[in-house]
Image (cartoon, rainbow, N blue to C red):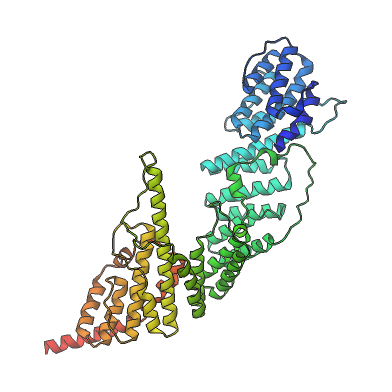
Amino acid sequence: AELESCFHPLLLPDVYFRAPTHCLTAADLFAWIFFSVLEACGACRQDLGTEELWQKVLQEVTLEELQAPLHRLGALQAAWWLADCRLGSVTGLFQLLSTAEDPERAFCSEGENKLLSLIKAWQVPAEGASLSLVQSAKDLKEILYTAAAFLQGLQELEAGNFPTALSLLQEAAGGFCTKKILAQIYTCLGCCAQRMGKPQMALQHLKRALQVDFQCLPALSHAAAVYHELGETDVELQALTLLYEALGKNLPAAASCSPCFLIQTELLVHTPLLTSLLRHHQPSEVKYLLAQRCLQNGRVTDAVEHYLDFLSLLQEGLQQQVPLDGGSALPRIPEVFLEAASALEQSGRHQDAITMCEEVIRRTTDLIPRVLQVEERLEQPECSSPGAELAGGLLSQKKENLCCLAWRAAGYLHQGQAWAKLGKSKEAVTQFSRCVCLPVTENLQPEVEVLQKIRLLTLIGRGMQFLELGSLQISPGYPAAASYLVQALWKLNRKQEAAAQWQKLSQSSPGEDEQQQGQGRPLPLYLVSCLEQVVFPHSETLARSIQDYLRTAAQDTSS
C-alpha cells in the first residue's frame, strides 16, 4: 500500500492522460493507461494480462513522442513487480524495452546476471525540460538495479547457493540505497559468509553493517552467534551485553545523505528470509542468552544474576517480553526455572534452588494425568490418513504430558541434590524417591529419553545418600552406577563381591556406558550439573585398593 501510494503522482505526468485515480489501484492504472494508449494509436483493445499488454504496446505503439513516457512507465512497472518479487516478469519487461531500443544488441555476456545486465544496459529516456519531476528515471534505474541484486541475492541465499548469493549481495552493496538498507545488505552478507563456514569474513561484514548504521541491531546479534561458534565466550558475552543495553534505549535514527525519493529500495525488498535475518530480539531473549552462555561456561555467579533478571522481566509482562512466533531462542519457561535452579545450586544457594524447583513442581503437577501410557515410539500419523488431525492432536498432548512429567521429575532431582549438599540425607532420599521411574526401552523418543536419564541420575543420587546413611541400595544396572556399587560393597567389607564387580566393570567396553545412558544424545542444560554431581570421584583410589586386595588374595591362594 505504501508503494502503491507513490505511483499516482509518478504515473500521470509521464503519459499526459487523466484517470480517476481516487478509485484505482496501481495495477488498474497500468491497465487503464495501456488501453488508452492503444486506443489513441488506433490499435484494438483486447482482454490481456499486464505482461501481454506490455508486449502489445511496445510492438504497436510507434509514435516517437510516446516512447520516452512508455519507458518511464516501464520503470514504474518494474518497481511494482520487484515489490511483488516477480523477477521473471521484470527480466521479460527489460528484455522488451531493450529490444525496442536496439533489436541487434546482446545485453548479457556469458556468466553475467541477465536481469542486472538488462537494467544496466537500459537507456534512460531524456527528461523534458518543462516536466516537474518527483523522481528522475535515472535515479529510479539505480534503485531498481540495487533492489534486483538484493532480491536475487536473498533468493540464492535461501536456496543454499552461497557463492552466487555472496556475489549478488556484494553487487547490491555497491548500489544506490540508504544507509539503513546498506547495513541490511552487509548483515545478509555476514549471514551468507557464516553459512559458507567463513566466520572471519562474516564478522567483517557484520562489523561493516554496524559502522554504516549503529541501529542495525540484528548485525550485533548475528555477530554474537558467530563468536559463539568460534568459542570466543568473552567477546560473545560482550556483544550480547551491548545488544541488551541497546534494546533498552531509544537510539536516534542514523543520518542519511541520500535524497528523499518516493520509491526507495526499502519499498521493493521485503521477503520472509529478510524478515527472519533482520528479526529484532526482545530484551528477555538476550538476557536469557546471557544467562545460558554463562551457565554453559561455568560462570555460575553471573548466570544466577542473569536468570533472576530474566525472571523479573517476565513478571513485568509475559506477552510483551516473550515472542510467540516460533523463532525465539527461549526454551519453555519451566526449563528456564530448572536452569536457574541449577545455577543457584552450583553457586551454593541450595535453599533458593529448592524454592525455585518447588515452583516448577507446583505448576506442572496438575497438568499431568493420573495415568500416562508411555510407548517406545511416538510416531506422527500421515496427514492423508483418516483421523490424522485428531491423532496428531493426541500425539501433541501426549508429548506435552511427557514434558510436564520430565520437568516435575527434574525438579525433584534438583531438590534431592540440593538437600544432599545441605547434609540432609533423609530429605534428599525423600525427594529422589518422588522422581518418576520408567523401564528401559530401545529407540526412545527425546521426551521419554530425558525421563530415562532423570531416572538414572535419581537412582544414583539416592544410592549415594543411602551410603551416607550406612545402607546398601540396589544399583540401577547402569555402568555409570557400577562404581558406586563397588564402593558400597567395599565399605560393607564385602570385598570379594566388590572385587568381582570391579573386574566386570573393568572389562566392559568404553562405549557401553554411553550407549546404555541414551545413545549419546546431549542432556538438557538443566540436567548437566546433575550428571556432574554423580560422577564417581574416587575411582583411582578404589581401584588401587581392590588391586592390592586381589594380589594379596592371589598370594594366599598360591601359598
Can the viewer see residue 296? Answer: no
- All told, the count of numbered labels is 0
Task: Answer left or right for 150 relative to 453.
Answer: right
Q: Vertically, is 197 above or below 544?
A: above
Q: Quadrant of residue 100?
A: top right
Can the viewer see residue 546? Answer: yes
Q: Residue at x 69, y 36 (%)?
A: 1
Q: Position of residue 554 (x, y in %)?
A: 16, 85
Q: Residue at x 65, y 61 (%)?
A: 243
Task: Answer left or right for 357 relative to 541.
Answer: right
Q: Residue at x 44, y 76 (%)?
A: 415
Q: Vertically, is 181 above or below 368?
A: above
Q: Position of residue 362 (x, y in %)?
A: 47, 69
Q: Vertically, is 463 above or below 268?
A: below
- Nearer to us in this view, 370 or 460: 370
Task: Answer left or right for 551 relative to 370.
Answer: left
Q: Position of residue 233 (x, y in %)?
A: 56, 66
- Nearer to us in this view, 467 or 65: 467
Q: Given the current orientation, which residue lies at the most extreme right position? A: 130
Q: Residue at x 27, y 71 (%)?
A: 477
Q: Position of residue 442 (x, y in %)?
A: 29, 58
Q: Vertically, is 96 above or below 417?
A: above
- Nearer to us in this view, 221 or 176: 221
Quadrant where the C terminus lies? bottom left
